[in-house]
Image (cartoon, rainbow, N blue to C red):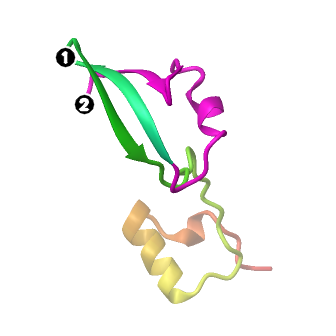
Amino acid sequence: SPGDELLAIDQFRVTADQLDDRLRNYSPGDAVTMTWFHQDELRTGMATLAAPQPKRYEIVPVQHPTPSQEKLFFGWLGQPLSHLVDNSA
């Protein structure tokens, strides 16, 4: 929940700055014990780790988009892909 504070993973202290480094010691599917504060109450529970999720995405236009790709691009960003790609090559 918003405002919860993660304190430890498998009884090792963890801060927000250390979280990514600490999770590198595990693989997707590993079960870990987590300790956190929730509304000033100390809680401990088990969690099964999922695969890491990307933290950023990059949109890279293709030189020769299919009609379906052009339609999806317009539906998503509201402008034609041709404004970003020079298809004269």
Q: Secondary structure at mark 2?
A: loop
Q: For mark 2, what is the residue?
A: 1
Q: Is residue 19 magenta?
A: yes
Q: Label 1's element?
A: loop
Image point (65%, 31%), residue name = 21
Mark 2 is surrounded, within 10 Å at the Cα level, by few (under 14), some (14 to 19) or many (20 or more) other residues, namely: few
Q: Quadrant of the C terminus?
A: bottom right
Q: Which residue is mark 1?
A: 39
Q: CA distance from mark 1 to mark 2?
A: 9 Å
Q: Residue at x 58, y 20 (%)?
A: 17
Q: In the displayed structure, would residue 69 be above or below residue 9?
A: below
Describe residue 57's horizontal placement relative to residue 85 as left or right.
left
Q: Which mark is residue 56?
A: none
Residue 14 image offset from top left, x and y in percent:
53, 20
Amino acid type assigned to the residue bearing label 2 in the image: Ser
Q: Residue furthest right?
A: 89
Q: Which residues are magenta?
A: 1-30
Q: Amino acid at mark 1?
A: Gln
Is the magenta region chiefly helix, strand or loop? Answer: loop
